[in-house]
Amino acid sequence: MGEYATRLVVGVGGRAGVSVSEVCALVEETLRAAGLPTEAVTALATLDAKTGEAGIAGAAERFGVPLIGYPAEELAAVEVPQPSEAVREATGTPSVAEAAALAGGGELLVPKRRSAAATCAVATAHAHDLRHHGDAEVLDTGGALVDLAVNVRSGTPPEWLKRRIADSLGDLAAYPDGRAARAAVAGRHGLPVERVLLTAGAAEAFVLLARALGAVRPVVVHPQFTEPEAALRGAGLRVRRVVLKAADGFRLDPAAVPEDADLVVVGNPTNPTSVLHPADALAALARPGRILVVDEAFMDAVPGEREALAGRMDVPGLVVLRSLTKTWGLAGLRIGYVLAEPEVIAKLAAAQPLWPVSTPALVAAEACVAPAALAEAEAVARQVAVDRAHLLAGLAEFEEITVSGVAEGPFVLIRVAGAAEVRTRLRALGFAVRRGDTFPGLDSSWLRLAVRDRATTGRLLQALDHALALAAR
């Protein structure tokens, strides 16, 4: 199956007197059925009270890994997909195997499986680094690397936008007044101003959503931009994940989202998979009493903004996030906006500090939604589609590389054996690319590449050929 860099923890439970052979057989069969190697297992984990069980302790010894025990009260606080009241009454936790597997902060890969007297579940040994972003790949490099790790369009902001921003500096003595920018954004989407909130980038919006709306059962659809989950966890919420599969092209099945979720977050097109979900599939997630958050930060990079939900007022609970930092190169200025029902906008606004968006950012927002700017963005989106096709054609020449899903955004997700080494060699050859293992649902065999012009792509493909040849030695 090739390289498997993700480390695993197997949670185990068992009745009194369970044998070593039964525990080992269940664990081995569970790993084999999931396509996971036994050599990736770093520990077995269970309830404190079961660490003295000869069958469980003996299984850890046979696998050559430590046995970790957790107090019942700690495991009882871990949310599991298959809780059992009978197990809770007997042990103090609703699922020994699943809770023990997850207790170290990882994510569940295989839910609970049973034999006659044993249970087991498999999780990653560590949680993904939700605060890692593409800019980390190019920090402190002094511009020495060609940046394919950050999805901001190269060569931006354009000169006309720089001049508009520079002209606003004379107004810095006055407090920011967002009325004109808010009205411009509302007009751009055909919405009343009461449905618009300007924010200091999408990142602020995620924090507001996590803290101001009172959600208690949030779900995040992965792989996707990790900041929404980080914000929800930072607000003290337990986040459930729906992880889309590469084998399915990272396509969304609305039925996979738990019915009781009161807040659902999904990207469209999704970072890092570049998959564009049908608007109807996303709208099907709406429910009474549910907030449906669709992150459309990269939608203006899709020609015609196909499948966009921004501007829709017929989807209950819909919240659409937009960013102006990607297409226009304004990551350092921090400007984005939220589109939602007036009641939701009012709650989010009440949680904002005073004057959250600076005067230069407000001027930029108004400029970037003007008709001339929208026409320029559409032309850029069409060029991105051409440049992406060129990149995909070049990647198809490498038998070592797989592209899962249909890319529709300004970036492409690839899978390649030895990706960590390939990434390091690309850096030595002058190219920074985004590692994929910080995204839930992906491991270290994935890399994300920003779409650039044909000349840059040509140089990348040459460097990639060289890096793969060196990695194969």
Image: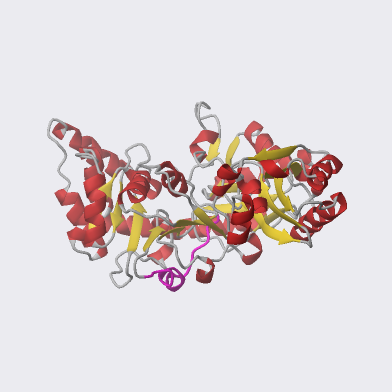
Please give left or right for residue 97 compared with residue 279 in the image: right
Which residue is rendered at x = 66% and y = 42% of the image? 125
Query: Residue at position x 30%, y 49% from top?
Result: 212
Q: Which residue is outermost to the left?
A: 174
Residue 68 image-quadrant placement: top right
Q: Which residues are magenta?
A: 273-287
Magenta portion: prevailing SS class: loop
Q: Is residue 272 magenta?
A: no
Image quadrant assignment for residue 81: bottom right
Residue 327 percent across, percent down from the top left: 39, 49
Instruction: Identify which residue, 99 or 283, lies in the foreground.
Output: 99
Which quarter of the rendering shows the C terminus?
Answer: top right
Residue 370 in view here:
no
Residue 66: x %, y % from top left:
76, 37
Q: Please identify the quarter of the rendering in which residue 227 is found.
A: top left
Identify which residue, 217 or 327, lies in the foreground. 217
